Amino acid sequence: SQKIEQNSEALNIQEGKTATLTCNYTNYSPAYLQWYRQDPGRGPVFLLLIRENEKEKRKERLKVTFDTTLKQSLFHITASQPADSATYLCALYQAGTALIFGKGTTLSVSS
Amino acid sequence: DSGVTQTPKHLITATGQRVTLRCSPRSGDLSVYWYQQSLDQGLQFLIQYYNGEERAKGNILERFSAQQFPDLHSELNLSSLELGDSALYFCASSVETTGQPQHFGDGTRLSIL
């Protein structure tokens, strides 16, 4: 069956370190992979989109990698700040289907 | 501000009742999506409309229905409500349908007593 798995445990890191979040998938052939940020009680906010033929995408302190052989995406936040504390969702788009979300990883950055 | 407006923000009702959730998409977006989010299930896709027509269906119960009107706003109708329907319901919109970034509203929190 199709599955999207994100770090099941919450991730706790210190301010200034790099946070790395993982998104693994099985039985999908995604054309796009997206990352969203969600704060408590708010809707998800789009961060980055990476296509199947792209290896890496950057935006300010954010970096996403996409390995279609490993069926994995890594999401990095460099020089993390307490304001980066949130839940991060990965989402896959496969042609002919809707965007499917993982359950998310909760990141907590302490000062 | 995503530009997507959902009303009401909170809704408290009883089992067996019927409610309507409303969504106004971001200006220029033709596609509207509805999601249900509960603590144990994560964000579950319910249904998508594009320019007034149903485009994709997810795990939407038969007791739930939706429509998109000519002005592109959308409504999600939930009937014969059960305790398990308590959740956050999000609406999102995008310009088209092909996996583009979606812009989410802040949701309607539905509590069934």
Image: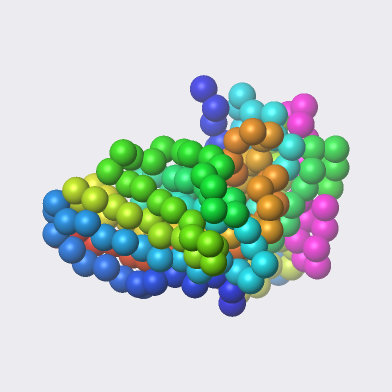
- In the rendered view, tell whether residue A85 sits above or below residue B94: below
- Residue A69 is inside the magenta segment: yes
Q: Which residues are magenta?
A: A57-70
Q: Nearer the viewer, residue B82 or A109?
A: B82
Q: Position of residue B39 (x, y in %)?
A: 36, 51
- Name the image quarter holding residue A52: top right
Q: Position of residue B113 (x, y in %)?
A: 14, 59
Look at 59% across and 44% down and name the residue there.
Answer: A99
The colour style of the image is rainbow
Image check: B110 left or right of B91? left
Residue A59, visible in the rendered structure: yes
Look at 46% across and 38% down and name the residue there.
Answer: B58
Q: Position of residue A58 (x, y in %)?
A: 82, 58
Name the quarter where the C terminus of chain A is drawn: bottom right
- Residue A58 is inside the magenta segment: yes
- Name the image quarter holding residue B86: bottom left
Residue A88, visible in the rendered structure: no
Look at 40% across and 65% down and name the residue there.
Answer: B22
Look at 17% across and 56% down and name the residue there.
Answer: B17
Q: Main secondary structure of the magenta part?
A: strand
